[in-house]
Amino acid sequence: MKSFKNLSILILSLVLFCSFSLKDSPSYVGKWKGEDKGDIGYITLTKDGYALFEFDGQVMGGKSFVRDGVEASMQYEVEKKDNYYNLDIIVKKIEDDETMGTLQGIFRMNSDTEMILALGFDGSSRPTNFETDQITLKKVD
């Protein structure tokens, strides 16, 4: 009887464990490649909340980089909306965590490997649609 009880507990545990699927990270986490007017660039969104931009072999962002002679980090925050996401890319001084600038954007996932991104460059406000200044990104990593 004792072994039947142990076997029942084991089977119940396996059923509960197998019924939940855990996803390592959201589909937007990863390295994304985009092309605009023949120029190719990359944006990486890491699991731990850092963003990196890569263009012409130069990398800016991540946990530590130098901007205007100041050591900084580039982080991102995502907020889920109805059928898209708000994206804030935030540059902060490492020494005192002061915000140096924020780039606001929106994105939507067409699939786990394709993202449509619109960013408000030059300090402009967050885009409200994907009709202008949008780029299609393909996941590469």
Image (cartoon, rainbow, N blue to C red):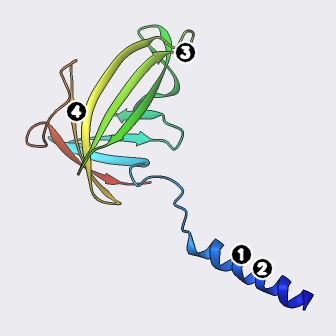
The answer for how far apart the CA atoms under marks 4 and 1 are is 46 Å
Front residue of 107/137: it is 107
Q: Nearer the viewer, mark 4 or mark 1?
A: 1
Label pair 2/4, CB-CB below 8 angstroms: no
Numbered disc 4: secondary structure: strand
Q: Secondary structure at mark 2?
A: helix
Front: mark 2 or 3: 2
For label 1, the residue is: 13
- Please state which amino acid type lies under the numbered disc 1: Ser
- Residue 52 is drawn in which quadrant? top left
Instruction: Give SS at disc 3.
Output: loop
Task: Decide if residue 133 is on the left or right side of residue 99.
Answer: left
The answer to whether the residue labelled 1 contacts the one labelled 2, judged by CB atoms less than 8 Å apart, is: yes
Q: Which residue is located at x 55 percent, y 15 percent?
A: 94
Mark nearest the camera among 3 and 1 is 1
Q: Gap between marks 3 and 1, in whole Å?
A: 45 Å
Foreground: 53 or 120?
A: 120
Residue drawn 54% across and 68% down? 21
Amino acid beneath label 3: Ile
Q: How far apart, in angstroms, are the residues tagged by discs 2 and 3?
A: 50 Å
- The residue singled out by tag 3 in the image is 94
**Left or right: 5 with respect to 25?**
right
Q: Residues within 10 Å of mark 3 (few under 14, many from 20)?
A: some
Give the answer, above or below, for where 18 lies relative to 64: below
Q: CA distance from mark 1 to mark 2?
A: 6 Å
Q: Identify the disc placed on residue 119.
A: 4
Which of the marked residues, 2 or 3, is nearer the chain's N terminus?
2
Earlier sequence position, callout 2 versus callout 4: 2
Mark 1 residue element: helix
